Amino acid sequence: MNKTNLSPSGPAIVAKAPCRADLAGGTIDLWPLYLFHSGAMTLNFAVNIQTTCRIVPLKGRGIHLRSLDMKREEHFTSFDDVRAAKKFRLPITGRLLQFFAPKEGALIETDSESPAGAGISGSSALMIATTAALARFTNRHLTLEQMRVIAQNVEAQIIEVPTGCQDYYPAMYGGVSAIRLDADGIHREAVPVLPEEIESRFVLAYTGVPRRSGINNWEVFKSHIDRDKRVFRNFEQIAKIAQEMHRALVGADWDEVARLLREEWKLRRTNAPGITTPFIDKLIAVAGKNGGQAAKVCGAGGGGCVIFLVEKGSVSRVATAIGDAGGRVLPLQVARDGLRVAPIVS
């Protein structure tokens, strides 16, 4: 493939979307699992760890893809080459390009502040940012829900297993979310919790080992569909815990939130082998000795990030202990805003 002429032909489009930390109800957001559990919901909050897609229109027909965080590039002489491609070095951008089918050349540059495989939905947030940027670039007027459907379906094509819906909502809306999973569709509502309350009570740490969400979720999914009674009962409890945690968050009952977080993690780690690891268990134990009240892995587990609920006033102490034990503490600030898209004049 020949390198693309990178002469701009117009202003850049920049889209940003935040990652998330999940609190309860994960994996049950895979269709159709939630249809089998009355009142199913997931709870999460957006974290100010951003993903970005920047599109620069180019003179000519060439398309240049670049990932700043992954340090990868791809060049195509025209969209015809993109359409014919079976594999991409940058599959998120490549697959979404195939869907949006731009008629002009472009430099499409992506970046993510999330560590690789962190389990904080970096890929889903980037899917939303890239979907929004490409929609603007191709003059497609899409609602947020239409963007969510496109991003979720294309991500399923990429990872080749079912994808859940919860990860896209923090990226779109920011804040703290309750995502209700009903027979008539998916409904997101904001949970009235002050961001400062979240920031004063939670610590987020990366284990240094990427998780493989598609694999873990697929094993649990198959067990559920195969009517494994133990897995089904676990999901019944997970659905109940999410409902109770929603009430506890609204009522600012943090002791109850901690109890439910412990209960959710206890259930989740029995769903499939490999959801926890000795190092994850070590970090949770270390946190518990320094003011930690509860913890769980973010996403499917097996690595990635762990979210810790701690006694108010002990965030710094817990963060230091986790760092001393080998974990990488990430900045935890609730992203007040979700998706942002703007044309940037060079």
Image: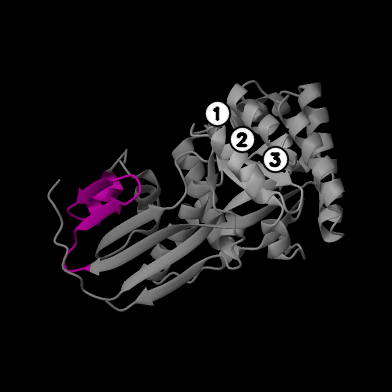
Q: Look at the image and tell me whether residue 60 can be seen.
A: yes
Q: Nearer the viewer, residue 283 or 69?
A: 283
* Total number of numbered discs in the rendering: 3
Q: Position of residue 88 (x, y in %)?
A: 31, 41
Contact between marks 1 and 2 (CB within 8 A): the answer is yes
Please say if the residues under marks 2 and 3 sit with CB atoms less than 8 Å apart: no
Identify which amino acid the numbered label 1 is placed on: Ile
Up-down relation of residue 221 to residue 140 (above or below): above
Q: Where is residue 155 shown, x and y percent of the image?
A: 49, 45
Q: Is residue 305 visible?
A: no
Q: What residue is disc 1 on?
A: 215
**Is residue 59 one of those drawn in magenta?**
yes
Quadrant containing the C terminus is bottom left
**In the structure shown, which secondary structural element does the residue marked by tag 3 occupy?**
loop
Q: Residue at x 32, y 38 (%)?
A: 87
Residue for badge 3: 32
Q: Earlier in the sequence, mark 1 or mark 2?
A: 1
> Quarter-wise, where is residue 292 in the image?
top right
User: Between disc 1 and disc 3, whose residue precedes?
Assistant: 3
Q: Which residue type does callout 3 highlight?
A: Pro
Circle 2 residue: 300
> Marks 3 and 1: in contact by CB < 8 Å?
no
Helix, strand or loop under label 1: helix
Residue occupying image coordinates x 59% and y 59% = 333
N-term-proximal mark, 2 vs 3: 3
| Residue stretch in magenta | 58-84
